[in-house]
Amino acid sequence: MSDYLDIDDEEVGVMKCLSIRQPWAGLIVLGLKDIENRTWGTSYRGEIAIHAGKRMDDDMAEDLDHKRAMNPFERIRVRLWDRVFADGYNDWREHPAFARGAIVGTAHIVGCTETPATGHAAAAEFWGQDCAIWWRLVH
């Protein structure tokens, strides 16, 4: 039973949730990002809600907005724009997956991996960062 409300947790459909800044949250919900970097792991496997925080990662947003030489996110940017247009939107910021301060969708945690030594993450996984625990996600 919940401490706050007099309702069984199973009655209200309690779900675990992960808060992530945009545009990262939207990229996960659209299936374009499959690793979330954290400093801690989890043994939980299964569906989670993706909560988009109110703050935007402005550097990443700029990478998604502009086609530039040497943009490491260019292939993601192209796939994102294809999806946004296919869903009937003219700008990725208008797509519901990129709302802020809200639950924007779900994903499944399928594993957690501690990264190898510094310098190996970039070669191993596009989204993985060194010295992080990779939460492997599928949408």
Image (cartoon, rainbow, N blue to C red):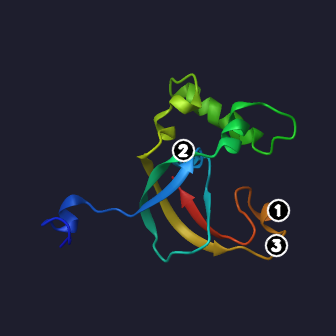
Mark 1 vs mark 2, CA separation in Å: 24 Å
Q: Earlier in the sequence, mark 1 or mark 2?
A: 2
Estimate how packed mark 3 is, as few (under 14), some (14 to 19) or many (20 or more) residues with alpha carbons within 10 Å.
few
Closer to the camera, 123 or 36? Answer: 36
Q: Which residue corresponds to the image point at 39% horizontal and 64% vertical from the top-left?
A: 16
Closer to the camera, 45 or 36? Answer: 36
Q: Position of residue 30 (x, y in %)?
A: 54, 43
Q: Which residue corresponds to the image point at 74% horizontal and 56% vertical from the top-left?
A: 126
The residue that mark 1 highlights is 123
Q: Position of residue 43 (x, y in %)?
A: 49, 77
* In the depicted structure, whether residue 24 falls above or below residue 136: above
Could you tell me which secondary element the residue under label 3 belongs to?
loop
Q: Position of residue 61 (x, y in %)?
A: 66, 39
Could you tell me which secondary element the residue under label 1 belongs to?
helix
**Residue occupying the far right of the picture:** 69
* In the depicted structure, whether residue 99 falls above or below residue 37: above
The residue that mark 3 highlights is 118
Mark 1 vs mark 3, CA separation in Å: 11 Å
Q: Earlier in the sequence, mark 3 or mark 2?
A: 2
Residue 136 relative to residue 87: left or right: right
Could you tell me which secondary element the residue under label 2 belongs to?
helix
Q: Earlier in the sequence, mark 1 or mark 3?
A: 3
The residue that mark 2 highlights is 26
**The disc label shown at residue 77, or none:** none
* In the depicted structure, whether residue 66 falls above or below residue 110: above
Which of the 4 image quarters holds residue 17? bottom left
